């Protein structure tokens, strides 16, 4: 039997989940380091949520092994549940209870005393900007407020490992920003975060490392910068002051950088692949020595959007359903 390193926060080896003939999770390996934000990126139906539900003991594992802080998910589920917090895609709070009552209930269910549950609820309501709505039934909350209350409920006992399954889906930009700040604060306080998301900017901003999942398999893993290198090098974009110098500038850049620039005459711009960003200074010096004026320049790295499209064959435009959801909860 393959051993699992108990120094990792979350470890999976050959994780498999099948639903009939559908292999929803297909032999996925993961290693989430303690104290990091690990992003899981993929399109709808990729298997992200199924994988998280297995790691959180909510679905049985059909193949492979997984552990949380060294405890086997399948055989020590009762211990794993004490070590994790989980926020799913949909709010799990009781609509008929107030925000305060919901959090106190979760605290009591997690073994806190009555006074400890009350104190923890008050702290979390303030932290998530819900103190003014603490006495209102959750059914009166906006979608964004319910998402914040749901996340607060998952943090009632300060778990060391937190699974966030698309926690900002449907939130307005301001509330998303608040959630990002909260997630960073949790890590600063010692938590490990596993974050699934469809938002590329979210993964780019928050995640230390990212696994890209598609059709139940892991197709790539690395830091955001490492993933970006999969689709090519950076590009240097130069806008010239004189359109008549485009040809001469292209010749100079070809000699210095060794790549053929692509001209955009209507913008008086040249774009050239740039494997080594240090060559930018050499290019500028050579252009100046040849009397070629430069109005502006930019060095651009590939985006996660390009990575996502290259790896999954899908763009990142939100679906009509997602757009409608955002309108409803804004």
Image (spheres, rainbow, N blue to C red):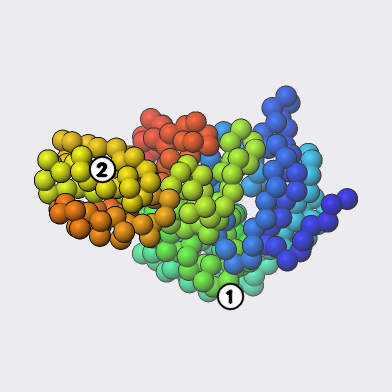
Name the residue: 72% across, 51% down: 12
Asked if residue 219 is positioned above or below residue 182 in the image, the reply reads above
Q: How many marks overall?
A: 2
Q: Can residue 147 be seen in this view?
A: no
Label 2 crowd (10 A; few <14 / some 14-19 / many >=20)? many
Q: Residues within 10 Å of mark 1 (few under 14, many from 20)?
A: few
Q: Position of 47 compared to 247: left or right?
A: right
Q: Position of residue 258 (x, y in %)?
A: 38, 46
Along the line of sight, which residue is nearer the eye, 211 or 108? 211
Secondary element type, mark 2: helix
Residue at (29% x, 37% y) in the render: 262
Q: Mark 1 points at which residue?
A: 115
Q: Position of residue 222 (x, y in %)?
A: 57, 52
Q: Identify the residue position indicated by label 2 in the image.
A: 250
Q: Can residue 186 be seen in this view?
A: yes
- Which label lies toward us, 1 or 2? 2
**Horizontal placement of 149 versus 18: left or right?**
left
Q: In screen coordinates, is 178 left or right of 39?
A: left
Q: Distance between the residues labelled 1 and 2?
A: 72 Å
x and y percent of residue 276 in the render?
42, 55
> Label 2 near label 1: C-beta < 8 Å?
no
Q: Nearer the viewer, residue 287 or 221?
A: 287
Q: At numbered mark 1, what does the secondary structure look like: helix, strand or loop? A: helix
Residue farthest toward the top in the current orientation of the protein: 21
> In the picture, residue 248 is in which quadrant?
top left
Question: On the rendered structure, is 175 left or right of 212?
Answer: left
Foreground of the two, 128 or 217: 217
Q: Which residue lies furthest to the right in this view?
A: 1
Could you tell me which residue is drawn at 75 percent across and 51 percent down?
A: 66
Name the N-terminal-most of marks 1 and 2.
1
Percent coordinates x, y for residue 320 in the rendering: 38, 30
The residue that appears at 69% across and 43% down in the rendered structure is: 28
């Amino acid at each position: 039997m393959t051993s699992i390193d108990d120094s990792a926060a979350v470890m999976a080896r050959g994780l498999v989940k099948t639903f009939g003939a559908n292999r929803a999770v297909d032999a996925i390996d993961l290693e989430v380091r303690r104290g990091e934000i690990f992003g899981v990126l993929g399109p709808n139906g990729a298997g992200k949520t199924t994988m998280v539900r297995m790691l959180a003991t909510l679905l049985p594992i059909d193949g492979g092994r997984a552990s949380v802080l060294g405890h086997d998910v399948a055989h020590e589920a009762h211990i794993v549940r004490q070590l994790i917090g989980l926020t799913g895609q949909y709010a799990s709070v009781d609509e008929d209870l107030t925000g305060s009552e919901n959090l106190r209930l979760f605290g009591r269910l997690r073994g806190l005393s009555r006074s400890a549950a009350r104190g923890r609820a008050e702290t979390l309501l303030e932290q998530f900007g819900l103190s003014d709505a603490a006495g209102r039934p959750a059914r009166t909350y906006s979608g964004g407020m319910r998402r914040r209350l749901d996340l607060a409920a998952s943090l009632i006992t300060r778990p060391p490992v937190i699974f966030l399954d698309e926690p900002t889906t449907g939130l307005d930009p301001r509330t998303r920003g608040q959630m990002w700040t909260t997630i960073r604060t949790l890590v600063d306080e010692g938590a490990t975060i596993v974050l699934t998301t469809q938002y590329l900017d979210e993964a780019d901003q928050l995640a230390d490392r990212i696994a890209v999942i598609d059709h139940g398999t892991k197709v790539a893993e690395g830091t955001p910068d490492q993933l970006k290198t999969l689709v090519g090098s950076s590009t240097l974009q130069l806008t010239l002051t004189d359109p008549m110098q485009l040809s001469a500038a292209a010749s100079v850049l070809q000699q210095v950088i060794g790549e053929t620039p692509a001209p955009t005459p209507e913008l008086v711009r040249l774009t050239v692949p740039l494997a080594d960003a240090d060559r930018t200074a050499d290019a500028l010096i050579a252009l100046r020595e040849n009397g070629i004026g430069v109005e502006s320049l930019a060095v651009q790295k590939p985006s996660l959007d390009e990575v996502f499209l290259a790896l999954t064959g899908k763009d990142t435009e939100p679906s009509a359903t997602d757009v409608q959801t955002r309108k409803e909860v804004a």
